[in-house]
Image (cartoon, grey):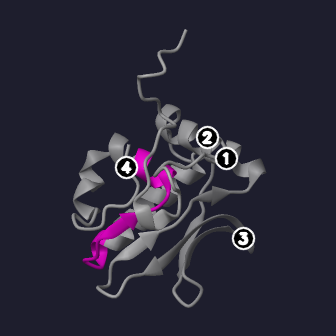
Amino acid sequence: MTDPTRSSRYDFEYPDEAGYPDGKGTLSQDQVVLIDEVIDDPRAPAFDFAVVNDEKAGIYEAIVGDREIAGMPYSVAGDGRLVLLATSVFPEFRKQGIATELIRRVLDDVRAHGKTVTIRCPIVRTFIEHHPEYADLIDPEHPGVTR
């Protein structure tokens, strides 16, 4: 039996500005699948894909050929910080390491540009918890989602 007082991989707290009155949100089944991928399946993706930063639209896109297979929308805060909003992978490409590699490449790009991030996406939060070498990218004044 699960102890309800213990936290799980699916427990997150959101800052007040996220709009949840109790400071907690409910994860969708899609988010749960991607969190499981990030935690349980750290392998390299099953195939190569390009990551394109569409700055005008505010989204990093994972592209194979001419097809978008995953994305991570973001907004830019006034101080140049990126607010990472969500991670999504089309269902037929899930459980293949795409989410994990997309997050890694986005965070590498953030680092290369000398920026920090505020995390609104629990999948990105989970990735960073399991890859602490990216923790320095989290803006200390505006960290976003927490456990």
SS state under label 3:
loop
Counting residues from the N terminus, which is met first, the one under dot 3 or under dot 4? 3
Q: Secondary structure at mark 1?
A: loop
Query: Residue 1 or 96: which is nearer the viewer?
Result: 1
- The part of the chain drawn in magenta is 111-126
> In x, y percent, where is residue 83?
42, 72
Q: In the orientation shown, which residue stands out farthest toward the top?
A: 1
Q: Amino acid at mark 1?
A: Ser
Camera-nearest residue between 78 and 37: 78
Q: Image check: 65 left or right of 131?
A: right
Res 2 seen here: yes
Q: Which residue is mark 3?
A: 65
Q: From the image, tell me which residue sits under label 1.
A: 28
Q: Earlier in the sequence, mark 1 or mark 3?
A: 1
Give the quadrant of the N terminus: top right
Q: Which residue is at a point 35% across and 72% down the rendered structure image?
A: 110
Q: Position of residue 32 (x, y in %)?
A: 61, 40
**Tag 4: amino acid:** Thr
Q: CA distance from mark 4 to mark 2?
A: 16 Å
Residue 96 visible within the image: no
Badge number at residue 146: 4
Residue position marked by numbered label 2 in the rendering: 32
Among the two numbered marks 3 and 2 on one chain, the one whose residue lies closer to the N terminus: 2
* Residue 64 falls left or right of residue 105: right
Q: Is residue 109 above or below residue 49?
A: below
Residue occupying the point 34% across, 43% down: 129
Helix, strand, or loop for circle 2? helix
Task: Give the x, y percent position of residue 145.
Answer: 41, 55
Q: Are marks 2 and 1 in contact (CB under 8 Å)?
A: yes
| Distance (Cα) linking label 3 and label 4 | 36 Å
Q: Position of residue 80 (x, y in %)?
A: 32, 84
